[in-house]
Image (cartoon, grey):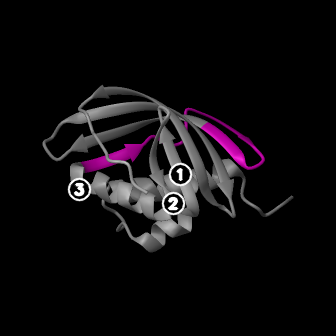
Amino acid sequence: MSSEKSAIDIIQTAFAWFNDVGAGRTPLTREAVALHFHPEASIMIDTEMKGVGAEGMYLRFKEMQEKLEHWEATQPFDVCLTDGDKAAGHYQYRFTDKQGGQGVIDIVSIWSVRDGKVYRTIENATYMGAEILLATHG
């Protein structure tokens, strides 16, 4: 059996870190982002590019910290599939903003990984509750 991590394992490791940042258990640093996200990483949500590069991901997460009190992506994923360097999953992103508003984003994501890191993310999202508007980074 190969000791190489599957695509879904890489994604779930990144999400565990992401949740730790969202809960304030670990600091957000460029170095930590670079451990989980490929230098050419990208995220597209509902056909709109929202972040490009590890720096773009860092800036996106930093903006989230500035606007949100707390966030959590539900783990484990409700449904997940993995095939080679690709994975897909369904989860909810739950957050509380700085004004106390709460929101839930129901998300289906398709990811690809490269060099043991998150490379491409494509998401389809349904929004409920408080609204969070984030800039495009990268």
User: Element at badge 3?
Assistant: helix
* Quarter of the image with the C terminus in it: bottom left
> Residue at the spot x=38%, y=32% of the render?
105
Outermost residue toward the left in this view: 99
Residue 58: percent from left, percent from top:
41, 62
Tell me the kind of residue under disc 1: Ser
Most foreground residue, 116 or 79: 116
Residue 77 placement, left or right of 60: right
Residue 67: percent from left, percent from top:
22, 50
Whole-angstrom CA distance, mark 2 to mark 3, is 20 Å
**Taking 84 as reference, is 40 above or below it?**
below
What numbered label is drawn on residue 66? 3
Q: Look at mark 1 in the image and give the residue it sits on.
A: 42
User: Element at badge 2?
Assistant: helix
Q: Is residue 56 magenta?
A: no
Tell me which label, 2 or 3, sits earlier in the chain: 2
How crowded pointer 2 is (Cα within 10 Å; few <14, some 14-19, many 20+) is rated as many
Quadrant of residue 4 within the rendered picture: bottom right
**Taking 39 as reference, is 123 above or below it?**
above
Tell me which label, 1 or 2, sits earlier in the chain: 1
Which secondary structure dominates the residues rendered in magenta? strand
Tell me the kind of residue under disc 3: Glu
Q: Which residues are magenta?
A: 69-88
Q: Nearer the viewer, mark 2 or mark 3?
A: 2
Residue 38: percent from left, percent from top:
59, 62
> Residue at the spot x=55%, y=62% of the render?
36
Tell me which label, 3 or 1, sits earlier in the chain: 1
Residue contact between numbered discs 2 and 3, judged by CB atoms under 8 Å = no
Q: Look at mark 2 in the image and give the residue it sits on.
A: 53
User: Element at badge 1?
Assistant: strand
* Quarter of the image with the N terminus in it: bottom right
